[in-house]
Amino acid sequence: MLDALGGRILESREGYAKGELPLTEMVMQPTRVYHAGAIIALADEVASVAIVGGRATSEDLREGGRLFPYSVQISTNLLDNDPVGPLTAEARVVRKGRMTVVDTEVFSSTGKKVALMRSTHLMVDLKKTGPHKAQAIE
C-alpha cells in the first residue's frame, strides 16, 4: 500500500524499519496536511517491514515461506501534522512471537513527532489461516 501512496521503505533489518511518505494530493485532507489514514497506513506498513526484516518477498509470504504479520490491533496517537512533508516513520519490534508487538514513531519534515503507534500482529501462514487462504490469493 505504501508504494501506491507514493511512499517507500528507506531502511529495513530484522526488528527495525524506516520509511517515508511525501505530501501529495493523494494523501492530504482538504486543509492541505496529511490525512490521518495516510499517517496510519505509513506507520502500519513500516511496522510490518520491521517484523519481516525486509527480506521476505510477496511471493515468499503467499507461498508459505514466511509468516505474514496480520495486523490485529492498532493504537495510534496523532500528535501533530505537517503541511510540507515528507513524513518519516521508524518502527521497532518490541516482542516477537505468534503475537508480535511493534512501536512506531512518525516524524514531520522538521523532526517533530507527528504520531505514536503500537500495533499487534498475528503471525500467520497465508495458506493455512484467515481470509487469505490459498484459493483467495490466486
Image: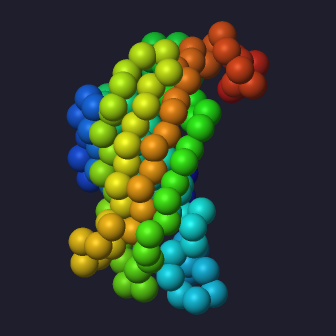
Residue 23 in the image, given as x and y percentages of width and height: 44, 77
Can you say whether 36 is above or below 105 in the image?
Answer: below
Residue 18 in the image, given as x and y percentages of width and height: 29, 50
Q: Which residue is drawn at 51% across and 33% down?
A: 120
Q: Residue at x 53, y 13 (%)?
A: 64
27 or 110: nearer the viewer: 110
Residue 100: image quadrant is: top left
Can you say whether 136 is above or below 92 in the image?
Answer: above
14 or 101: nearer the viewer: 101
Protein image colouring: rainbow
Residue 74 in the image, given as x and y percentages of width and height: 56, 44
Residue 83 in the image, given as x and y percentages of width and height: 42, 85
User: Which residue reaches farthest bottom?
Assistant: 31
Give the left or right position of residue 37, taking residue 118 as reference. Answer: right
Residue 53: image quadrant is: top left
Give the left or right position of residue 45, taking residue 73 as reference. Answer: left
Q: Residue at x 43, y 31 (%)?
A: 101
- The answer to whether one can see residue 137 in this image is yes
Q: Residue at x 61, y 19 (%)?
A: 126
56 or 19: nearer the viewer: 19
Residue 62: image quadrant is: top right
